[in-house]
Image (tube, helix red, strand yellow):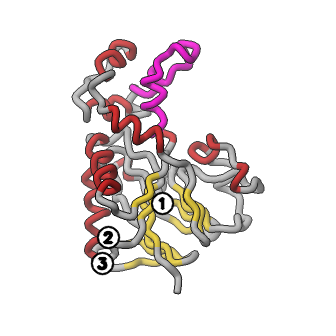
């Protein structure tokens, strides 16, 4: 018998979409099935704090949830490291707080207004405002999770490189040559990071990112071996 597992793509600060997805899982009677969240919990949406609270609470309650890190989830750590470890122009604070990256929305969910302000002043205000537990949780997230049939990552993998030798940056950032590679990777690669209109099964990989960060629906996906199904309130729709 194939053990089912559920995967959830990029949430990007939309706690209402996370609540909806978790409600769908419960409605389907799958609340005890392991769930893997593939990262990008923060930025763009209005309630990054709420997303982290829900995921941390679920894990603390013993729910079978695995949370991986996404590239956006690393920005907050780099932001708090400050510009001292970088050339000033390379510090993430200069980009993360822009609307495209979405960091200002993340800080706003913690009560810190950042848009249009000096990033160093924002850093001073945010330090001590964002709970250390949230930052520590994000810092400690793994970048890969494997089952017999699947490898879960945020961005993808470098084709042709053994899983144990993958570059950690590729796991959260890669697009090409991963997205266009059609070879079998030994396991079905389940990832997010590259937004589409809805989750998609490409044969050797499943892309979970249906664009929740741009206002589209966050769909949980049920995996049974290499078969994948979008979960709705009442149905399981094959991908």
Determine the residue positioned at 68% across, 56% down.
Answer: 180
* Foreground of the two, 132 or 75: 132
Disc 2 to disc 3, C-alpha distance: 7 Å
Residue 62 image-quadrant placement = bottom left
Q: Residues within 10 Å of mark 3 (few under 14, many from 20)?
A: few
Vertical position of residue 186 compared to residue 39: above or below: below
Vertical position of residue 117 compared to residue 193: above or below: above
Secondary structure, mark 2, is helix
Point out the residue furthest to the bottom here: 1
Secondary structure, mark 1, is loop
Q: What residue did someone put label 3 on? A: 29
Residue 19 belongs to magenta span: no
User: Which mark, by number, is residue 14?
Assistant: none
Q: Nearer the viewer, mark 1 or mark 2?
A: 2
* Foreground of the two, 63 or 86: 63
Q: What residue did someone put label 1 on? A: 208
Give the residues in magenta.
72-97
Task: Pinpoint residue 214: horizontal percent, then vertical percent.
Answer: 37, 47
Task: Pinpoint residue 117: horizontal percent, then vertical percent.
Answer: 32, 15
Q: Is residue 210 left or right of residue 215?
A: right
Q: What residue did someone put label 2 on? A: 25
């Amino acid at each position: 018998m194939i053990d089912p597992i559920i995967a959830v793509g990029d949430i990007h600060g939309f706690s209402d979409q996370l609540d909806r997805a978790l409600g769908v899982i419960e409605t389907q009677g799958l609340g005890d099935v392991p769930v893997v969240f593939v990262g990008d919990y923060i930025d763009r949406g209005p309630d990054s704090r709420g997303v982290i609270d829900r995921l941390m609470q679920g894990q603390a309650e013993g729910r079978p949830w695995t949370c991986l890190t996404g590239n956006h989830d690393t920005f907050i750590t780099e932001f708090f490291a400050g510009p001292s470890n970088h050339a000033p122009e390379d510090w993430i604070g200069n980009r993360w707080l822009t609307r495209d990256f979405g960091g200002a929305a993340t800080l706003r969910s913690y009560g810190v207004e950042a848009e249009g302000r000096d990033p160093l002043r924002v850093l001073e205000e945010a330090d001590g405002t964002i709970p250390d537990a949230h930052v520590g949780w994000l810092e400690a997230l793994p970048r890969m999770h494997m089952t017999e049939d699947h490898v879960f990552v945020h961005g993808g993998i470098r084709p042709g490189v053994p899983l144990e030798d993958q570059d950690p940056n590729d796991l959260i950032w890669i697009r090409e040559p991963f997205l266009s590679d059609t070879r079998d990777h030994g396991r079905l690669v389940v990832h997010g990071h590259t937004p589409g209109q809805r989750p998609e099964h490409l044969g050797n990989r499943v892309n979970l990112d249906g664009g929740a960060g741009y206002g589209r629906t966050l769909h949980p996906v049920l995996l049974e071996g290499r078969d994948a199904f979008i979960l709705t309130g009442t149905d399981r729709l094959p991908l």
